[in-house]
Image: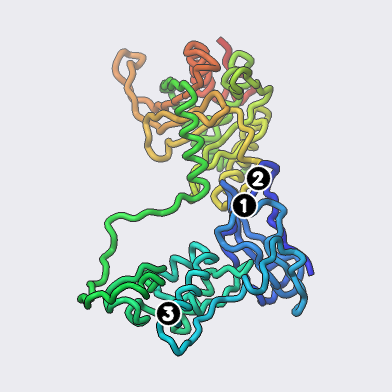
């Protein structure tokens, strides 16, 4: 008999939320089968069984926020007692499911049933409660299979499948068509002692609501908290400029058309911008932008720990490309894609979602021409990368000529640096991008 613990996904993670159980108590389990799914504030995972046996107990239900390394289930042989692994084990009387009892005295039977239902209501999961309210499931027949005698969703579904549902009118406590004051409109004890209500006509089926509410997922809560803290605590300014993207686009075209034999066909414009930004930030004069502002101190980074903003189905994630200034363009391209793929699959190591010293957010693919990125504290800067645009400038013969331009938006923490140093960074980054081939050759622009 072995306990199943909540894994620790990274040193920064203290607890995880169980999102789904793929096995139920009494099921056979084989090594490699998925037991349950869970999530941190930014990533989702599946926990596989490492031992064969029977799932003897589930100690935390879906939706529970479980501390890392705490027991969540027990696997063993049939007949073994898993209670040794269960914290705060309830007594047999507390865990026994409530049953409706028949009585010769109708009033006593009603009171007894209501008390039983209210007892169940005190130990029913939110998901099971919602299902019971929608279906009219009679919770007095609920057989609790959750931990510590808790009624969970599958217990309510079993009542529905068995036809054990009830309406207030069927209980004979409230008038037909009226609504009780208990769970899901069911009769409560005060309904049993109140005068009978007059008959009312049946109400039409409710229409789809014009508005609805959904509980925020954890990652959205984290993003909201971080963005609110950023905008309320940091004096942020944004500088925007455009640069001539002709050479950048020419190089990207070369990689796409002839780079496959060299492994470079997948290099993107975003990869080239990250490469240039990492080399620019690594210059000593731009140290205030490759830093963390910590109140009365500033932590400077020798190497560039580049945060890469990634859009995922669960929300924005920012994995860290470690020591980006030391990596080749190909390494940056490959590792960035690996990080993005892990984020989108929900399998990113949470430790890779922290520690960035600067962030790049690329929204050019959406056609955005300019925007104001928000700093991810305690970082002191974030670079926004925008779309390629057609711009007009005077040609060599004095006539207007069309060229390809890209806009960059730098938001910086005015507590850590002033406008002139921020502008110098943008100037140097512009020169490096406009001369990307020279930069790839090992040089970097210096004023």
Q: Is residue 223 above or below residue 208?
A: above
Q: Nearer the viewer, residue 173 or 261?
A: 173
**Badge 2 density bin: few <14, some 14–19, many ≥20, Cα 10 Å:** some
Q: Nearer the viewer, residue 119 or 386?
A: 119
Residue 316 in the image: x percent, y percent? 50, 42
Give the CA distance from mark 2 to mark 3. Answer: 49 Å
Q: Is residue 381 above or below residue 200?
A: above
State the residue position of label 1: 16
Q: Quadrant of the N terminus?
A: bottom right
Sooner in the amino-acid sequence: mark 2 or mark 3: 2
Is residue 276 in sight in this rendering? no
State the residue position of label 2: 13
Give the CA distance from mark 3 to mark 1. Answer: 42 Å
State the residue position of label 3: 110
Residue 381 - label:
none
Q: Is residue 329 above or below residue 14?
A: above
Residue 202 in the image: x percent, y percent? 23, 76
Q: Quadrant of the C terminus?
A: top right
Kindly indicate whether the residue at mark 1 contacts the one at mark 2 (C-beta within 8 angstroms).
yes
């Amino acid at each position: 008999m072995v306990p199943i613990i909540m894994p620790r996904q990274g040193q920064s993670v203290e607890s995880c939320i169980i999102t789904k159980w793929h096995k139920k108590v009494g099921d056979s389990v084989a090594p490699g089968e998925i037991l349950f799914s869970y999530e941190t504030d930014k990533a989702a995972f599946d926990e596989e069984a490492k031992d064969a046996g029977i799932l003897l107990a589930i100690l935390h239900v879906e939706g529970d926020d479980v501390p890392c390394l705490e027991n969540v289930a027990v696997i063993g042989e049939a007949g073994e007692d898993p209670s040794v692994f269960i914290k705060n084990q309830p007594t047999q009387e507390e865990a026994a499911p409530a049953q409706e009892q028949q009585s010769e005295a109708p009033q006593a039977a009603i009171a007894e049933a209501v008390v039983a239902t209210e007892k169940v209501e005190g130990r029913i999961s939110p998901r099971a409660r919602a299902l019971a309210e929608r279906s009219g499931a009679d919770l007095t027949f609920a057989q609790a299979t959750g931990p510590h005698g808790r009624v969970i969703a599958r217990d309510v579904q079993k009542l529905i499948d068995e036809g054990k549902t009830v309406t207030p009118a069927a209980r004979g406590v409230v008038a037909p068509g009226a609504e009780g004051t208990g769970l899901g409109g069911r009769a409560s004890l005060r309904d049993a002692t109140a005068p009978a209500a007059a008959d009312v006509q049946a109400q039409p089926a409710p229409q789809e609501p014009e508005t609805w509410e959904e509980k925020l997922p954890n990652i959205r809560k984290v993003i909201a908290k971080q963005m609110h803290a950023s905008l309320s605590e940091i004096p942020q300014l944004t500088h925007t400029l455009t640069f001539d993207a002709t050479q950048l686009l020419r190089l990207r075209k070369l990689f796409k058309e002839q780079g496959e034999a060299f492994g470079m066909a997948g290099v993107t414009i975003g990869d080239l911008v990250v490469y240039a930004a990492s080399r620019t930030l690594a210059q000593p004069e731009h140290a205030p932008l490759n830093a963390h502002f910590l109140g009365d101190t500033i932590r400077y980074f020798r190497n560039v720990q580049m945060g890469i903003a990634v859009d995922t189905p669960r929300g924005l994630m920012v994995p860290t490309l470690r020591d980006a200034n030391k990596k080749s363009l190909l390494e940056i391209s490959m590792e960035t894609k690996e990080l993005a793929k892990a984020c989108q699959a929900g399998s990113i190591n949470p430790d890779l979602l922290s520690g960035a010293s600067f962030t790049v957010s690329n929204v050019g693919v959406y056609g955005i021409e300019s925007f104001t990125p928000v700093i991810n504290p305690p970082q002191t800067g974030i670079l926004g990368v925008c779309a390629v645009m057609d711009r007009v400038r005077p040609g060599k013969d004095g006539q207007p000529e069309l060229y390809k331009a890209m806009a960059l938006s730098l938001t910086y923490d005015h507590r850590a640096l002033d406008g002139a140093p921020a502008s110098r960074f943008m100037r140097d980054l512009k020169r490096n991008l406009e001369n990307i081939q020279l930069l790839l050759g090992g040089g970097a622009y210096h004023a």
